[in-house]
Amino acid sequence: MRSIRVSNFGGVDALTLEDIPPPVAGPGEVRIKVHVGGVNFPDLLMSEGKYQHKPEMPFTPGLEAAGVVIDVGEGVTCFKPGERVMGFFDYGAFAEEAVIAEKFLMHVPDGMDWEMAGGFCLTHTTSHAALVHERVNLKAGEVLLVHGAAGGVGTTAVQIGKALGCTVVATAGSDEKAQFALDNGADFAINYTTEEIRTRVKELVGGADVVYDPVSGDAFTQSLRCINFEGRIIIIGFASGTIANAPANYVLVKNISIVGFPVGSYRRISPEILQRSYAGLTEMWDAGHLKPQQSHAFSLADTSEAIKALRDRKAMGKVIIKVRDGE
Amino acid sequence: MRAMRLHGRDGIDAMKLEEVELSVPGPGEAQIAVHAAGVNFGDTLMVTGQYQEKPDLPFSPGMEAAGEVIALGDGVDNIKVGDRVMGSIGFGGFAEEANVPAANLTQVPDDMDWATASAFPVAYGTSHVALTYRSHLKSGEVLLVHGAAGGVGLTAVELGKEMGATVIATAGSDDKVALAKTYGADYGINYSSEDIREKVLEYTGGADVVYDPVGGDAFKASLRCINFEGRIIIIGFASGEVPQIPTNYPLVKCFTVDGFVWGAYHRNKIDVIHDGYAGLREIWAKGVLKPHISKRFPLAETGDAMRFLLARKSTGKVVIETRV
């Protein structure tokens, strides 16, 4: 089968497309015929050897995908061949076939197409699990401020925030992206290249109760200045390339919480957190709260280009790999 | 009545003992005959104008007191004349009488003396609400308490044990560590001679909740021995050093940093304060708490009491007895 491979940590340009033997489903595992894979920031970090988790080389990158079950290993009870499934992988999604532990797999809900399913499990789960986690506990009626709201995880945070009954303020780096966030359901949008986040948040809603931050840098620093009493800032990532510092006296005086939410660690240490979100997200989809995302599609051979589109912050919505393109 | 007063925000030395006529209590206020008042770090800031709250001049400092209700303003229904009460009162406690926000007051248990009551609300209230409401400390978790021999630190040690946690106490001398151990700490670390992170990893493998009224190096060490899903509660910066939190740490290690200002809940969520008092009343009734008062001063020596606190020589609480 054809597979993208990482054989050294030379970054995205060192990725290769190779013909390798298909994987085998071990006990508790499911083998799927991949239709669509989703591209995420950790794919970039993994190709550079900068991600916490470093698989043994050579390996197939790719953390999320959707496809059809081919066969199942010993002890698998929830899935059978022919079913449409999607999952959050350890790695290995950018190939024609992939293997995943049953507990990280879910059925594709009725009415969801491959394009959405392929980019669903990591991004939607990250946002859902973070926003409903007990340390954050986003409540209906609260104000949710989403940075990088036109990006992969940001887009899902906007939709899930609305589904949870919140007022959502979105920030993004251009008018086009701000409009995209509004079209995606945000109540307000701020273009932070021309407007000051803190001033606008105060004008629009008075202050934010929860901040969802995959961006950091100045967006984080601005958040500290427009957050409400008992507010929570969720650290998701550092897409701006700058890791912000939080002065501890701000955190104290404003009585706020800085919450780190590494979805990969939760997947490894507390998989039940993911499973709870899989169930919650299926309900949201069935209730019509989650809209299909606009996506940028690339072929399997162009995986490097897909990751670069994400890295260079050119993408709006989700970047996906159509593995079966042309079939 | 006699009161320690300031006519400018000129510091401890400018405070004078004066004869003052107190006005009748305003709406929502209770007039109390102060029997004792706890001394807090915030008092030392308020006398120089460095505290968030800046009372109109002239004023009497003293943010924590216990006494008997002698008159009530309009609209007060949570207490009555003759009640023994205690609470965080904003300012005015270093006097024989004070008009205070009635909503902040709670009843003093029958078997608690005045000095203990005046030292109780801030230290126990802060630690109880911090460990229950704010950080959800669970039985079996590891609680690391910095500044464990100080006013709030000792109460965190006691309440942590009462909640079923394993408690590690840090302090700046062997004597202080020994005191924390007599209050129930399972392990003690003298950070002037031992490495906090190293010892925590050795004793328990890591900490689930860190209670930090110290800041500085103690905070930095906490970042390096906190467990998955751990919580660091920032209470204050007794070390004088305000740390910066590098935000990649909470992300990579999966923990939370919570700021906690107990006083601010009086304005924003008073129910949280009274839920805390209710929880503390139950624990007090068990007879397991040993409020520690390291020194008592008469009203005229309030300045000395503040200087004693600032010198970081005190353990537990310092109290002003207004009627001795």
Image (cartoon, coloured by chain):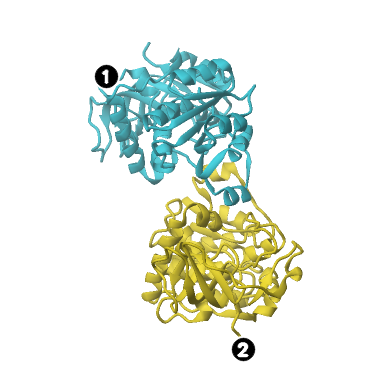
Chain colours: A yellow, B cyan
**Which of A237 and A253 lies nearest the eye of the viewer?**
A237
The quarter in which the C terminus of chain B is drawn is: top left
**Which of A188 and A74 lies nearest the eye of the viewer?**
A74
Q: Are marks 2 and 1 on the same chain?
A: no
Instruction: Relative to A19, say whether A234 is above or below.
Output: above
- Which residue, given by chain and number where applicable, does mark 1 sit on? B111
Residue B61 seen in the figure: no
Proximity of marks 2 and 1: CB atoms separated by less than 8 Å:
no
Quarter holding residue B284? top left
Q: Residue at x 57, y 16 (%)?
A: B174
Q: Residue at x 47, y 20 (%)?
A: B181
Of the residues shown, which amino acid type is indicated by label 2? Gly
Percent position (x, y) of residue B185?
A: 46, 24
Percent position (x, y) of residue B303?
A: 52, 18
- Which residue, given by chain and number where applicable, does mark 2 sit on? A326
Residue A109 seen in the figure: yes
**Which of A185 and A282 lies nearest the eye of the viewer?**
A282
Percent position (x, y) of residue A33?
A: 54, 77
Q: Residue furthest top?
A: B324
* Disc 2 from disc 1: Cα separation: 83 Å
Q: Residues within 10 Å of mark 2 (few under 14, many from 20)?
A: few
Q: Is residue A199 rendered to the left or right of residue A240?
A: left
Chain hosting mark 2: A
